[in-house]
Amino acid sequence: DAMVIQNPRYQVTQFGKPVTLSCSQTLNHNVMYWYQQKSSQAPKLLFHYYDKDFNNEADTPDNFQSRRPNTSFCFLDIRSPGLGDAAMYLCATSSIPRGDYNEQFFGPGTRLTVL
Amino acid sequence: DQQVKQNSPSLSVQEGRISILNCDYTNSMFDYFLWYKKYPAEGPTFLISISSIKDKNEDGRFTVFLNKSAKHLSLHIVPSQPGDSAVYFCAASSSNTGKLIFGQGTTLQVKP
């Protein structure tokens, strides 16, 4: 089945220790997104890739970086995690022409704990 | 500022009855609206959508209504089933950005 896969499902890191979250997709979608969701809050878009074009949200902290080495994979790097970065991180994909919209397909998420 | 709001954190209904989940938005540039359902330990899954040129879209037991003048949309589930128990997220998009803005979700519990 075509799907969006996130690894690991649960990640524990120490305050200030860099961590990388992984997302892969078999849908061959051109757009990939990273969201942060804190408890009982709306998922918040951090950034997205339209093909290879990186699009950062204005309020995404510099602490968060992303890489998309190819169509299938996208990584979220948190350079120096703080306690406030503990959250569920959701990866999503979509197949949309620029200027159009379509539903997004989500992975199961990675729950990040910062000690 | 929260552009998409779901003011009811939770809703409980009896099996077989109607569930109505509500969502309000503030940005008049939004022209596409979606509902997602999320079970514990899973990512959100797309449920139904509606374009701003329509006021109603129906898919089986699920119907979404859009009231543009009130900047309000609602999701109706009829009849509700225990398997519908989940968190429901409303999301909005504008065609010039292609990005989704989510509400904070409503937890629906359908009691047998």
Image (tube, rainbow, N blue to C red):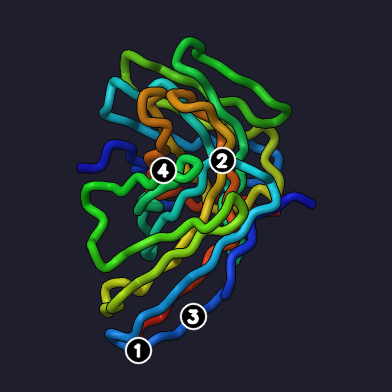
Asked if residue A90 lies left or right of residue A28, the reply is left
Query: Which is more foreground, mark 3 or mark 4?
Result: 4
Q: Label 1 lies in what chain?
A: A
Q: Are the residues tagged 1 and 2 within 8 Å (C-beta)?
A: no
Q: Name the residue under label 2.
A: A30
Query: Of helix, strand and loop, which one carries label 3?
Result: strand
Marks 3/4: CA distance? Answer: 28 Å
Point out the tag, 4 or 1, that comes first from the N-terminus.
Answer: 1
Q: Where is residue B38 in the image (x, y as percent from the top left)?
A: 57, 53
Q: Mark 2 lies on which chain?
A: A
Q: How far apart in space, not on screen, are marks 4 and 1 (Cα)?
A: 31 Å
First in residue order: circle 4 vs circle 2: 2
Which element type, helix, strand or loop, lies under badge 4? strand
Q: Is residue A65 left or right of residue A23?
A: left
Is disc 4 in contact with disc 1, using a CB cutoff of under 8 Å? no
Distance from disc 1 to disc 2, alpha carbons, whole Å, reads: 34 Å
- Distance from the alpha carbon under mark 4 to that under mark 2: 10 Å
Marks 2, 3 in one chain:
yes
The residue depicted at 28 percent of the width and 47 percent of the height is: A57
Who comes first in sequence, dot 3 or dot 4? Answer: 3
The amino acid type, in three-letter code, at marker 1 is: Gln
Of badges 4 and 2, the one in the foreground is 4
Label 3 belongs to which residue?
A: A11
Same chain for mark 3 and mark 1? The answer is yes
Kindly identify which numbered label has been placed on residue A14.
1
**Residue A102 x/y as whole percent:** 55, 31
